[in-house]
């Protein structure tokens, strides 16, 4: 089995849409921390109650809580099921924790696909999504904060993964299908196959 894949990029770049498409096309598991958090909020679990206000403010959920949630999900993932991580890791501590979690299970990160788009494009997409979906975590103030938090907390991970030779940069602007094709090409060059 090949290694797992991380799909990284700023809020609004299309990680969720693209991760789902990539996972579906290859029969991989799409592991989205955002989806896991929203599920906890919907079910009104203790975790959901703890993270709702954090997410509504556009901040990152504490590393320990996020890592525990990913650990629980990995425990139920078959060893031969490849994973596309979406929204995780977001901090250096999460990246280190992911390496440890995967190593414990005989897994590894094979590639990091970095979707990129200009900030104004991201803002417009997020504002459009907020109107379409009524998302409380996509107000103009929260959008600006989320983009700032990404630059401060997650952008440094790009260098972390580039130093390991794992990163492939992909232009996230254009029709969804065109971006998907660019991702597939980048994945093929990195031999990310099932």
Image (cartoon, helix red, strand yellow):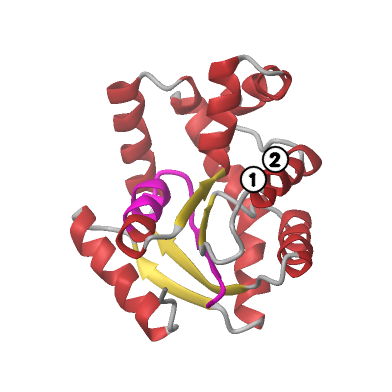
Classify the position of the C terminus by image quarter: bottom left
The label shown at residue 30 is none
Residue 147 location, x and y as percent?
Answer: 53, 43
Please provide percent x and percent y for residue 181.
24, 68
**Neighbour tally class for label 2: few under 14, some 14-19, many 20 plus, Cα within 10 Å:** some
Q: Residue at x 37, y 51 (%)?
A: 20
Q: Quadrant of residue 169?
A: bottom left
Q: Which mark is residue 69?
A: 2
Mark 2 lies on a secondary structure that is helix
Q: Are marks 1 and 2 in contact (CB under 8 Å)?
A: yes
Please say whether residue 20 is one of the residues in the magenta stretch: yes
Point out residue 81 in the picture as x, y percentages from the top left corner. 52, 62
Q: Nearer the viewer, residue 72 or 48?
A: 72
Is residue 113 shown above or below 64?
below
Q: Residue at x 71, y 43 (%)?
A: 72
Q: Nearer the viewer, residue 163 or 36?
A: 36
Foreground mark, 1 or 2?
1
Secondary structure beneath dot 1 equals: helix
On the rendered structure, is 151 left or right of 189?
right
Near mark 1 (Cα within 10 A), the count class, few <14, some 14-19 or many ≥20, is: few
Q: Quadrant of residue 100?
A: bottom right
Quarter of the figure with residue 158:
bottom right
**Residue at the spot 61% in from the left edge and 64% down from the top edge:** 79
- Judge whether 112 appears above or below 88 on screen: below
Magenta segment: 1-21
Q: How many marks?
A: 2
Disc 1 to disc 2, C-alpha distance: 6 Å
Q: Is residue 32 magenta?
A: no
Marking on residue 73 = 1
């Amino acid at each position: 089995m090949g290694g797992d894949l991380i799909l990284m990029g700023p809020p609004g770049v299309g990680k969720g849409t693209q991760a789902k498409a990539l996972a579906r096309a290859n029969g991989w598991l799409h592991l989205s921390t955002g989806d896991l958090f929203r599920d906890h909020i919907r079910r009104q679990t203790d975790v959901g109650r703890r993270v709702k206000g954090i997410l509504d403010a556009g901040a990152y959920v504490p590393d320990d809580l996020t890592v525990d949630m990913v650990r629980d999900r990995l425990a139920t993932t078959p060893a031969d099921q490849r994973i596309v991580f979406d929204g995780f890791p977001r901090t250096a501590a999460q990246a280190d924790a992911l390496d440890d979690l995967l190593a414990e299970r005989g897994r590894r990160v094979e590639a990091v696909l970095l979707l990129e788009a200009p900030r104004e494009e991201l803002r417009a997409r997020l504002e459009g999504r907020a109107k379409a979906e009524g998302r409380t975590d996509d107000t103009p103030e929260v959008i600006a904060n989320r983009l700032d938090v990404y630059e401060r907390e997650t952008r440094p991970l790009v260098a972390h993964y580039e130093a390991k030779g794992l990163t492939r940069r992909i232009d996230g602007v254009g029709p969804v299908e065109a971006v998907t094709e660019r991702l597939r090409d980048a994945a093929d060059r990195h031999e990310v196959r099932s």
